[in-house]
Image (spheres, grey):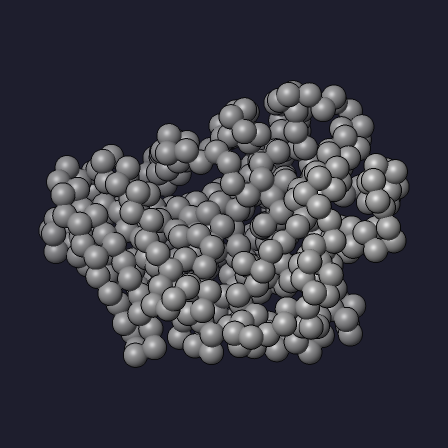
Amino acid sequence: MIEEVFTIQPNSKSNIKVKLIMPDDWNGRFVGLGNGGAAGVIHEKELSPYASKGYAVAMTDMGTGSTATPQQSGIGNPEVWKDFGHRATHLMTLEAKDRIKKHYGKLPKTSIFYGQSTGGQQSLSLAQRYPEDYNAIIAGVPAHCRTPLHAYFLWLYQHTHHKDGTPIFTADEESIYRKAAVELRAQYENFPRAKGCFISDPRWREGEKEALLEIVSKLLPDCTDEKLSALRAVQNGPVHEVSGKQIFDGVPPGAKFMMSTSNLYLFNWVFGADIDYMKLNFSSDYDKYHETLSADLDAEDEKLDEFKALGGRLIIYSGTEDHLVPYSATLAYYERVAKHFGSYEKANEFCQFYILPGRAHSGGNGIQELYRLMDGIRLWYEKGALPQQLGISCTGNFRIPVYPYPYTTAHDGTKRLLS
């Protein structure tokens, strides 16, 4: 087994680290793995299981590992923005394939990329920007709408904290709100909130947000106007202060809503290390931030024609209770894909989107589950075996079949059309 760690430097302000493993008993395939958060490190333990299955496998630190923390790497450095947004993953792939060809004497017959969260951003960026890099791509809970998503983080932080940065809500109060949301939704979906049940359709119903606030106002030990106003903002999501345009949706029902400053580093990349997050506005500040980073960091292009023409296969999934990367932006993206290709049926021929009931941002995705996902998309590409459902962990260890959108999983595990 050959293990190589190397650096790619497209220019003096870019420093991309990559690790590649090439097993002795190669199965002829290559796997690229996505990173997470602000990246900056290569997760060694995630590569070896694929190598043990015969895959050549690689991961990059996305170019954010050359400073004290990954969050600091992009401050005033547009080259890091490019690396983090798309360039590092692409260059990793080109270099890895070149080394694979030199070592084995041929290129991979199938190349598969899997990423979750930031890795999901990498996944969709590849399909959109570099459709020739991979034959099959899995985008899990993808942070593809990166700049609006971090504006959502800022919105939640500002509305759940006092001006001095102290939290408005306790952990118990957040738990009360979440439990009330799930119980209210149980009434709407007409099933008991018992072990093994879940929210299958995370879309807010008309009047449901205010109904929930009314319930919560009676449950919170100290329910103030400030707290109700904050919860209303959490539900509705960020809005541009001048245009009134919705920037991003609010949290889904049943999801967490407290946000720390750890996810606000993109604002430091634009405004500097010492900014006061509480003073940033959703007008001129948001405009500057979005205009500065969007071109490199966002992966929102629904025109996947070249990826499809090359025979590419794409699986995307989101969780109904994910507060870090809420399902709504990915659903909106998939709706645009379906519209571009004419129908859900035509889109599903090469690109399928799954909403995982009860799934938060993390959970599931053990290595055996990932093997099943990898095998599923590999067979789809290599054999034309169109997936009809996925068997994937949704609520803890509870496994149910999930179906490609516009279908979802009803509370009894059956297929149901979202209406």
> Residue 360, position in %: x, y?
58, 39
**Residue 268 in the figure: left or right of residue 119:** right
Point out the image quarter for the N terminus.
top left
Query: Can the viewer see residue 185?
Result: no
| Residue depicted at x 47% and y 55% | 37
**Residue 167 in the figure: left or right of residue 102:** right
**Residue 310 in the figure: left or right of residue 210:** left
Query: Can the viewer see residue 365?
Result: yes
Looking at the image, which is closer to me, 60 or 337? 60
| Residue depicted at x 17% and y 50% | 3
Q: Quadrant of residue 69?
A: bottom left
Q: In which quarter of the image is residue 215?
A: top right
Instruction: Give the number of marks.
Output: 0
Q: Quadrant of residue 10?
A: bottom left
> Residue 219, position in %: x, y?
83, 36
Point out the image quarter for the C terminus.
top right
Q: Is the residue 194 above or below the residue 237 in the image? A: above
Looking at the image, which is closer to me, 177 or 414? 177
Looking at the image, which is closer to me, 49 or 338? 49
Q: Is the residue 370 above or below the residue 96 in the image? A: above
**Residue 299 in the figure: left or right of residue 380:** right
> Residue 5, position in %: x, y?
21, 57
| Residue depicted at x 42% and y 69% | 73
| Residue depicted at x 20% and y 42% | 28
> Residue 48, position in %: x, y?
26, 41
